[in-house]
Image (cartoon, coloured by chain):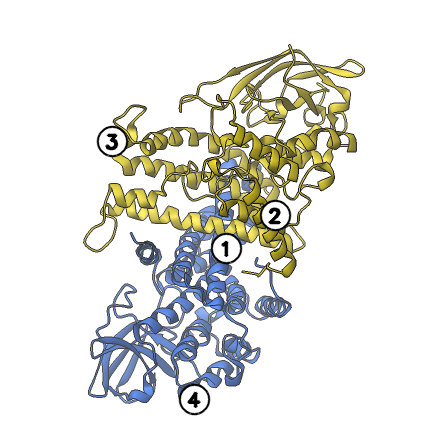
Chain colours: A blue, B yellow
Amino acid sequence: MAVLTEEQSMLRDAAKSWVQEKSPVTAFRKMRDSGAELGYDVAAWNEMAEMGWAGVIVPEEYGGSNFGYLSLGLVLEELGRTLTASPLIASGLGAASALILGGSEEQKQAWLPKIADGSAVAALAIDEGPHHRPEKVDAKVEGGKLSGKKVFVLEGMAADLFVVSAKSGGAIELYLVKADAAGVSRSKLSLADSRGAANVTFENVAVSDADKLTGGAALLDKVLDRARAGLSAEMLGAALQAFEVTLDYLKTRVQFGQVIGSFQALQHRAAKMFTELELSRSAVEAALTAIDNDAPDTAELVSLAKAKMGDTFHLVSNEMVQMHGGIGMTDAHDAGFYLKRARAAEAAFGNQAFHRDRYARIQGY
Amino acid sequence: MADFGGTDLEAFRAEVRSWVEANFPASLKGKPNPMAREERGSEPTPDQEAWRKAVGAKGWGTPTWPAEYGGGGLSGAQARIVQGEFARAGAYNPIGGMGVMMFGPTLLEYGTEAQKQEHIPPICRGEIAWCQGFSEPGAGSDLASLQTKAEDKGDHFVINGQKIWTSGAQWADWCFCLVRTDTSKKHEGISFVLFTMHQPGVEVRPIPLIAGSSPFCETFFTDARAEKKDLVGPLNGGWTIAKRLLQHERSGLTGAGGGLGSGGKPIEVLAKEYVGLDDQGRLADHDLRTRLVTNAMNMRAFQQTAVRAMVEAKGNASPSSATSIMKNAGTQLIQERHEMALEIMGHQGLGWEGDAFKADELAAVRGWLFGKAFTIFGGSQEVQSNIVSKRILGLPDLTQAK
């Protein structure tokens, strides 16, 4: 754990106690069982927004607290522990970053206060195929009309506003498109991890320069890096919880007349997971700190965090099921939730292979 | 990063810089530390001796140790300035070895005033080389089963037994040694004693290793003598001190460099030279590329963790849990790099000696083989995993290790 300021400690403690009291994994299970249309509990999201979490990175003049990305990461880590589903990453992190970094004064005035108080949900509509390839964009703006298909749009069903990547005159640009604009249609994706996502189609949607963000492909890269780092923080929390639950099981499950955690074959695998979690925490905190400092090596540090965290969550979620044995295979146990969430989070905003490739390219090989 | 540059520190930096300019012999600029060589056959040159004496007199080779025992008495920030100014001038720190890395910090913590006064200043001056008498043929991972016996003879102990893997014993002046002073107990029957290596009862035999020559020795004690005043800590209380010393040893063995530790080129650079890039600027061997970048990223995360552990140790009340993983994580990553260096060099990475191979290539082979020791010495990978399981994760212990 990084050395925190007093404000950051208070924020983290508030998140920790809210998550434990109001949003344990049983709440996620209830949401899943209810088949919630949006993939999250709206009442819980409203409570989160009331506590100011949707505006942690938003400047104060637009209704946020301007605490920065490491601070938001602390909240996301706590939420990740119990798999709390919410539009915080899509809206209060991803789309908010796009507006903060590339929005005009009018665009910021129009959307940031609503994002910060939770009254509007915004989402990133970037991917177009089965893999995250943000540089491959077929969506186009021609003659003031945006057309294209976006897939795996996180919180796509809940969104009031989309931040859409599209080519205009051959260059990638980001556009703000209201979900209720003529020509926008969406279909809910029912995903293994039960979180909210949609495929969204844009058909001759009217857009003007007033809807365009400033910054093009470089802006997109920066926005995605912020979403990646925040998602990595959520994954850190989830992986830590998965590990701790598994460790408890090793200390209580008795076979052959002793707790199974006394077997060295399992002990060393537990030590391996602990090691990977420590390395991952360092990478995640370093990435968030780099964003806060606008460090020149932010891109590689973010790719490091997302790849490392992806590998670690992958490992820990698999071990959670394996070490629990048969009970870990049952839907009644939480292990499956962590396993499913791990794969969805790994794929979002670039999996390990994507980020290893990106890191190597930045290093010149 | 925080800004450590207060005006006092800037004045100190200026002082260090002019001192280095005045004292560091130009002939040594950019030269490797002679202490880092595996074999120390040759006598030090007059310039090397002059530099050692100058740094030793300042105490700047052990910058944060108390000045009253010959250390530099500097703060951490000042010590970093000394380090930075040495690096800037292309100067190495001539004060090192086991005395600095392991024994000195342990004695400062557990030694009596008289012991500290006697043994610490020569370490700070780089005058005395120490060796570590811990492992025995029958006591490796299970170190506490050691049998080397010390008999109480009133004002001294008589020591009989055998140690192994005593690195640098052939060059050492003194030995810090674990001995059995009570055969009825295991951990509580061990004492920590010091004695000179220059006595008839001590015989040293170097052990050739798979990498060729090595600094490791077998050391035999036949009625060797240790003075009572050189017992550190209480009689039969040596295990606690040994554990503390091993922590110092392990923290020094993580190899958090990123290179191969021999000052050679990073393997990413080697890979570009030997394997080449494809038309998209990627390493032409894609299988290697994936493994190489994975290692590079893990190495970066490891370095980030080292920094985090240091910052947390200062800023938070409880010690960072990150430190416990460092030895295993670091040594495994370094070994992977050694393996990849060989793979990258292909046939040229198989040379044992001779003109057909470049110095880098020969060094890669020897480094690869010597590197196998990293996950064995200072507590094997398996013992480290046991320690994490038991002390950090609180899993039950079936080995009765302490």
Question: Pointer 3: residues within 10 angstroms few (<14), some, or many (20+)?
Answer: few
Name the element at disc 1: helix
Question: Pointer 2: residues within 10 angstroms few (<14), some, or many (20+)?
Answer: some
Label 4: which residue?
A110
Residue type beneath disc 1: Ser
* Chain designation of label 2: B
Question: Pointer 4: residues within 10 angstroms few (<14), some, or many (20+)?
Answer: few
Residue type beneath disc 4: Ala
* Chain designation of label 4: A
Q: Which mark is residue B79?
A: 2
Mark 2 vs mark 3: give the one in front.
2
Label 3: which residue?
B347
Residue type beneath disc 2: Ala
Relative to B114, is A69 above or below? below
Toward the right, the furthest residue is: B154
Label 1: which residue?
A282
Based on the displayed image, in which of its 4 quarters is residue A174 positioned? bottom left
